[in-house]
Amino acid sequence: MNKMRNSVLLTVLLLQLPVTTTKGGHWEDYKYGLQNSEQDKKQFCCSWKCLLFTLQWPGGFCQSLNKETLCRIPQSINTWTIHGLWPLQAQHCCSCWPMFHSDVQELEAELSEHWPSLVTTKSSFHFWRDEWRKHGVCAACVEGMNSPPRYFQICLKLRAQFDIHKLLEDAGITPSCEQPYKVEEVHSVLVPHLSDRHEIQCVTDDKDREVWFQVKIPLSHNLTLGCDHHGDAEDDLATGSNRAWSSSPGHPCPPQVPFYYFPIDHQQPKQPCG
């Protein structure tokens, strides 16, 4: 019953969005003016069946950075944030659809709250723009995500749907420097809400501790939980081999090794536990 309800709720997300268009010639060029080579490339990039909606935990994300000075956590950030929405087996689909600040101006406050940049070398807008260029243009094959505003609206709605912080807190799983957790106990809390295909990811900190920093949630083409594509996507979720997120510094949290769910420290983001 929970799976059916989640499926209906996620599918309805697309239907709730207003019809939006991007002003100027760029959208018209993309929609009507592609040359054959670009059309062929677009058709290839639209062959994806599944997406990964990825959330990151700021207290753990900072452990993935090489330099302490690279990390920043805005004072207003105290929960899980968006990393991206990535079509599997699709990357850099089209360079002909740029994104401008005006595309997300009306969403900027909400994006800053739920999708901030956590590195000092990149502004939040540049983070969003990079995600659109790498992944959003591939997701744009779906009508409900066929513009920057629609793509980011969907991401924000998914973030509201998957309130991981509350799910964990209700189960007594809270950030701690002393209490490690096991993969099995976290999975048992998240499976009813994220499907059994989700993946929790860790990074190894400078003290060789496994630190939780990311959750990847597989979604089908119509944004329902799980993924019905039993080919590349299934292998990718198991091995982490997909190009769309192979550059991620994380790895699946080892089932037999307890991991830490570090608290957020705004003053010392890379050293929350000393």
Image (spheres, helix red, strand yellow):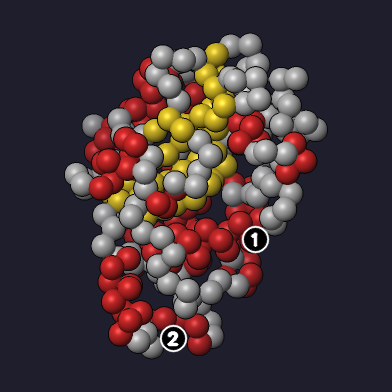
Lower position in the chain sequence, tag 1 or tag 2: 2
Task: Please state the horizontal and vertical placement of residue 230, each as a whole percent of the image.
Answer: 19, 44
Whether residue 105 is visible: yes
Q: What residue type is labelled 2?
A: Asp
The picture quadrant where one finds residue 239 is top left
Secondary structure beneath dot 2 equals helix
- Identify which residue is drawn at 44% across, 56% down: 154
Q: Which amino acid does label 1 sit on?
A: Phe
Task: Please state the horizontal and vertical placement of residue 126, each as a whole percent of the image.
Answer: 64, 61
The residue indicated by pointer 2 is 29
The picture quadrant where one finds residue 19 is bottom left
Task: Please state the horizontal and vertical placement of residue 7, each as a whole percent of the image.
Answer: 28, 43
The residue indicated by pointer 1 is 125
Nearest the eye: 21 or 125: 125
Secondary structure beneath dot 1 equals helix
Instruction: Tell me: residue 227, above or below residue 121.
Output: above
Task: Please state the horizontal and vertical placement of residue 28, each as a whole percent of the image.
Answer: 43, 85
Location of the C terminus by quadrant is: top right
Nearest the eye: 205 or 2: 205
Location of the N terminus by quadrant is: top left
